[in-house]
Image (tube, grey):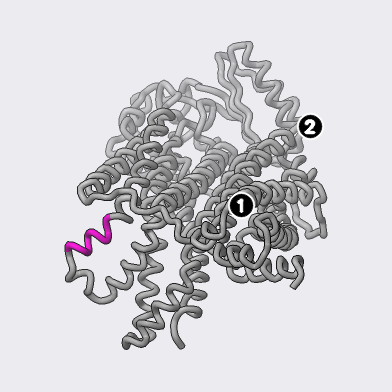
Amino acid sequence: MTYCKLSLRNARRQARDYLVYFVTMVLAAALLYAFNALAASEEVRFLAAGSANLSLMIALGSVAVVCVFGWLAAYSTRFMLSRRGREFGLYLLSGLTNRQVARLFFLENVTVGAAALVLGAAFGGLLWQLLRAIVLAMFAQPYRFTLDFSLPALGLTGLYFALIYLFALGRSRRRIRKMKIYDLIYFDRQNEGAVLKTGALRRLVFGLSLVLGVIGICLLLQMNMYVALAGALCAVLGLFGFFLSFASGVPAFFDRRPARKYRGQSLLVFRSLTAKLASMGVLMAVLSVVFAATLISEGSSSVLYGILKGRTAEAACFDLYIGIEGGQPDPEPYLSYIGENIPVEQERLYPVCMTGKTQLQDYLEDAYYNYDYDSDPVLRWSDYAALRTLAGYPAVEPPGPGRYLIHCMPYLAGPLGAYPEALLVGQTALSLSGLYTEHLSQSYGTANGRGYLLVLPDEAAEGLPVHHLAYAAKTAQPVTTKQYEALAGLARAERGRENYTFVLSKAYEEAQVAAQAVLVCFPLYYLALALMLTAVTILTIQQLSETERFRRQFALLRKLGMDRREMARALGRQFALYYSLPAVPAVLIAASFIVHLAMMPEPGVMVGWNSPAAITAVSLGVFFLIYAVYILLAYTGMRRNVLPN
């Protein structure tokens, strides 16, 4: 057999035996190509309105992802080298030199990497179309499928793959050239070994690891940068201590409790598990840290997007809104510009008044976070009814004589709906007749109240002091960026005359959300997916490497009388414990962090699908969905290969 044929045959066998690794590298190439195409797309650059920032963020994300996949390639090539050490030792015995064996291993992996790159680029083209469709939908632009292939993205992806494989294989080539026949043959027996030798030390480290983990979570929840760094360090040290003491302590636990050792399938399950953990305790701790980083990255991206969407939904419920504050607010410059440049279907200029009392502010003291008003804000009924029409909300019954309405953000509906007293406006007492919670631009000082406002009959609101003037409009077409910037320029000019004008445009705010999502949220999801794929692939490679040992083990158990169903149950329990160990601590740490992070924005922002509970549930759901796919693939393959027919 020629040298090239041997390399090609080994490459095919490697791709088959380590199919999970090969598929992951195909996905890695697809991800790299898709996001490089995103950065290179002139269409997306134009929509994001910041091509330099987009390219920078995608480049930084790609560098981080290349480092992650580089670690996967380096670990996997070293692992495959250890598993094939005897084969390479036989090559040396047959007359090949170390340099030739190193070149053979290099060519095999380059062939596998090239195949992964080609397949990944093809799949990446489809993934790029999906990302493009998502981005266009976020910017409210139509999507049309086009056969488009980016040569710059392909070239950059090829460069990244070359760096990944040259780094990983360079170390392996140097190692093979220096190793002797004996070292190669017994390379697969080099394990971590038990780091903690004595039972007392194991118990001490185990207890300290739990304490450090709890302290780390508590410090992470403080959300102070320096305190959070200390918390992260404590959590990482706790994870390493836990896995080192767990891997060393399980055998000792069963040695002191022989009855439990022989109960059911415990001996079979835990013997296999501890044999594995004894050789990879440190690796388990590293993978658990990576899983925590995956969830934190994914959850942080969702929280950021939820903040952007929540604030925009409340602030930009009108096509155009302008709030003018000052002793003598003058709306004429804005009205003149709008009349000349922006086609308007409906509009309303109105005052936002104050009662002169802090009756509801005092009542909401424990539930409300910021006021911005000296007293309770008020709208006249006629203005409120016009605003509901502008925003597209259904009409409501007007408050009758001696009655009033409340319009508030949803988180205040409970306490305000239960307000027990009559509202005093001047010397008149009013009772509540209705409460509504649609978005009505209630997040700013020159908006329609700060979280809530009172709607009074027009005659009851006569003579109340004006806090600011406001203008809301429904436009015939979305306000363009140029028009928005022109109005914002007028507002900046007005500020020098003791006026503070706030301009909001629905189209502009939604475009900003989409741009921020492309610039920040996409790279965070990108990184999270790369971390997840890398960690679960390493776990799966380690597990599938035991196929031959499991086959011999179950063949012996079959001869001893164990039936196939019981063997399948034992294999399933072993898989469940093996994959749970690094995931459970990571989930506890990351879920606590995500929930606390999602609770930090001002009230009323993180609601619905963006609530802390929903974001945490979705983040965990995506994580476990990918995790379950890899576990199912590994378990199905292992069960088919090791259980006797």
Amino acid carrying label 2: it is: Asn
- Give the residue at mark 2: 341
Calculate the distance from the C-alpha at mark 2 to the C-alpha at mark 1: 67 Å
Which comes before the other along the chain, label 2 or label 1? 1
Q: Is residue 366 left or right of residue 123?
A: left
Q: Is residue 380 left or right of residue 90?
A: left
| Label of residue 172 in the image | 1
Q: Is residue 533 left or right of residue 195?
A: right
* Residue at 40 percent of width and 21 percent of height: 356
Can residue 101 be seen in the rendering of this structure? Answer: yes
* Residue at 43 percent of width and 56 percent of height: 191
Q: Nearer the viewer, mark 2 or mark 1?
A: 1
Residue 414, how many percent across, how many down? 35, 44
Q: Which residues are magenta?
A: 249-256
Residue 385 quadrant = top right
Can residue 348 be seen in the rendering of this structure? Answer: no
Q: Residues within 10 Å of mark 2 (few under 14, many from 20)?
A: few
Q: Quadrant of the N terminus?
A: bottom right
* Residue at 69 percent of width and 34 percent of height: 53
Q: Residue furthest top?
A: 497
Query: Where is 247 relative to 337, above or below?
Result: below
Secondary structure state at the residue bearing disc 2: helix
Residue 341, how many percent across, how many down? 79, 32
Residue 84 quadrant = bottom right
Amino acid carrying label 1: it is: Ser
Query: Where is 136 relative to 501, above or below?
Result: below
Q: Residues within 10 Å of mark 1 (few under 14, many from 20)?
A: some
Number of on-image labels: 2
| Label of residue 495 in the image | none
Q: Is residue 547 left or right of residue 358?
A: right
Query: Where is 97 relative to 607, above or below?
Result: below
Residue 266, how many percent across, how many down? 27, 71
